[in-house]
Image: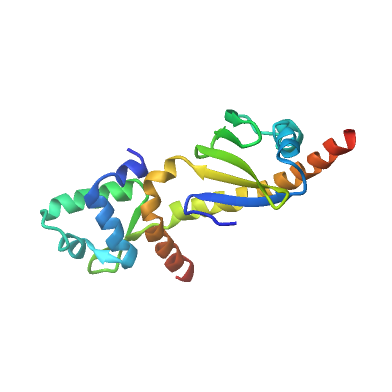
Amino acid sequence: MNALAALADPTRRRIVELLAERELSAGEVASQFAAARPGVSRHLRVLREQGLVRVRSDGRQRLYSLDPRPLADLDAWLTHYRAFWQNRLDALEIEIHRQRRKR
Amino acid sequence: MADGPCELRITRRYEASPAEVWEALTELDRWLAPPQGVTVTHAETERRLELDWRPEGEPRSTVTVELRVEAGRTVLVLEHAQIDATLGMRYVAAWSRALDRFEVS
C-alpha cells in the first residue's frame, strides 16, 4: 500500500482532516467515529506506516498529528521544476530567434 | 502564472507566429535536452504537445504545452503535473496547514 492508497479509505481521509486541524490523542480521534476504537487504532497505524501521520508521547498520552514531509516533498518538486521550466522556456526563445535568423 | 496544488503552470508570450514557436518547440534537443524517461505522447501541430515525464527516481508526471494566438503574439502555456498526486489533491490543503505548523514549531 502506498500513501495514496492509504488515503483511499474514507475513515482514514476523515482522520487526516481531523489531524489537519490539531494534534489529537487516539481517544479523541476515535470519539469522532461510531466505529469501535480498535478500528480507529488500526487506521492510525496504517497512516503512520505510510508516513502520513506521526505520533509523540507527552508522558500521559500518545498524540497524533499530520506529518508534513509529503507536502514538503511536493513543494521541493514544484520549486525545482518552476526554475527548470523558466530556464528552458528562455532557451526556447533563443531557439526561436536562432531559427528566424536562418531564414 | 497560477499553480494548482500538485502542478505548476507557466505562461509565456513570444513575438513569433505559432508556426515559428511550434517549429522551435518540437526541436526538443535544442532547448529542452529532455532527460531519460521523457517521451512525446501527443502532438497537435501548432496547438498542443504532451510529454510523459518519468525520469528515474522522480514521481511520474506529465507536461503539456499549449499554444494560442493573442494580439498578434503566440501565448504558450506550460503545465507540469504529478500524475499520482491527483488522488490526494483534496488533502493537500490539510497538508498545507500541517506544513505551516511544522515551520513555526
Counting from the top left corner in percent of width and height, residue A62 is at 25, 63
Looking at the rendering, in which quadrant would you find the N terminus of chain A? top left
Question: Is A8 or A102 nearer to us in this picture?
Answer: A102
Residue A64 in sight from this viewpoint: no
Residue A65 vertical position relative to residue B58 in the rendered view, above or below = below
Check the picture and name the quadrant holding the C terminus of chain A. top right
Question: Residue at image x 44%, y 51%?
Answer: A70
Coordinates of residue A69 in the picture (x, y in percent): 45, 54
Q: Nearer the viewer, residue B96 or A99?
A: A99
Coloring scheme used = rainbow
Looking at the rendered structure, the number of numbered marks drawn on it comes to 0
Which of the 4 image quadrants contains residue B2? bottom right
Whether residue A5 can be seen here: yes
Q: Position of residue A64 (x, y in %)?
A: 29, 61
Residue that appears at 32% across and 50% down: A48
**Residue projecting furthest to the bottom:** B104
The residue under the point 41% across, 55% down is: B92
- Is A62 on the left-hand or right-hand side of B93? left
Measured as percent of width and height from the top left, residue A99 is found at: 83, 36
Give the side of residue B42 with respect to residue A8, left or right.
right
Question: Residue sitting at 36 percent across and 52 percent down?
Answer: A52
